[in-house]
Image: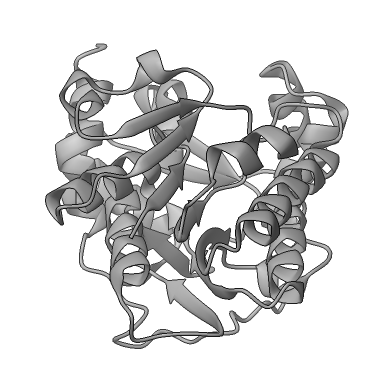
Amino acid sequence: MQIAVTTPTGNVGRHVVAGLVRAGVRPRVLLRDPDRLAPGIKDEVDAVQVDQYDADAVAAATEDVSALFWVDPTTGSEDPLADYARATRSVVRAVTRNRISRVVFLSSVGAEKRHGAGEIDGLAHTETALDGIGVDVTHLRCGYFFTNLELQLDALRAGTLQVVLPLDQPMAWVAPRDIAEVAVARLLSPAWSGRCVQAVHGPTDLTWEQVAGILTAATGRRIDVQRITDDAMRAQLRQAGMTDGLVEAVLGMSTGLREDFVPEQRRTVRTTTPTTLAAWAYDRLRHQITDAS
């Protein structure tokens, strides 16, 4: 089986690559800059330099591939949904031209809404496009990544997180490594076919108030969480350098799931993964916050 992996240096992709290598697979990895691969992994993979927005290049890079782990690349443009559409065209062309038999797609909780969830709408578009070509596909509907907290290190060091969601609203939080383990299992397992949705919910749903308490205990530094208005968050995102279109897309991922949203898949033993936020924060976040003091 020849397996291709996109975004192999990303939060999830790098763990997918490592998991496949441990399973005895030599994956083909697609990325813009092969020099970004970790030194220890370079000799274990076949690296292909490719822009995921270039449909012809992606199709050429996935020739003879039988299974594909696809992640829509991150975008910083004024029209992120247009970028998602370009990436979708690439994966559809690659799968149809090369007759790739199965795809594992990194989606998100909220994609089931199809519209009204900001940047997640781009993932929903990829889901429906893959569904439309009849390939065996698993959509991984993932919760909120622990690693998103690393985008707010300055705020964490200052002791305050600001969010637009209700502080007592629970949501799924998940470790990217756990997502990768599910992805690898799906890529290697012959036991499924057709269209599948596999939610990846982490070990438990957490409110932002609970998250603040967990981070305080893990880092030894008091961290409070504060709810702010949508406009205040817009101002913060613009100050961070985001375009207006990207600001609305990022904000929409929260506001679109704020009112009466219920995930299509409820939490079960199948959707629950083991790594806790407390363990991850102690291992990954604690030193990033305290060493900068």
Picture quadrant where residue 135 is located: bottom right
Front residue of 187 and 155: 187
Q: Quadrant of the N terminus?
A: bottom left
Residue at left 45%, top 60%?
67
Q: Quadrant of the C terminus?
A: top left
Q: Where is 88 relative to 107, above or below?
A: above
* Residue 64 point in image, percent of width and height: 48, 51
Front residue of 109 and 8: 8
Q: Where is 90 relative to 201, above or below?
A: above
Residue at left 54%, top 68%?
169
* Residue 262 point in image, percent of width and height: 62, 81
Front residue of 215 and 53: 53
- Residue sitting farthest toward the front: 64
Front residue of 184 and 269: 184
Residue at left 78%, top 44%?
249
Picture quadrant where residue 128 is located: bottom right
Left or right, residue 228 beside residue 6:
right
* Protein image colouring: one colour
**Residue 231 seen anywhere in this rendered image of the structure:** no
Q: Where is 288 relative to 27, above or below?
A: above
* Residue 287 point in image, percent of width and height: 18, 24
* Residue 170 point in image, percent of width and height: 48, 70
Picture quadrant where residue 123 is located: bottom right
Residue at left 16%, top 41%?
282
**Residue 91 seen anywhere in this rendered image of the structure:** yes
Left or right, residue 254 beside residue 80:
left
Left or right, residue 154 beside residue 63:
left
Total residue callouts: 0
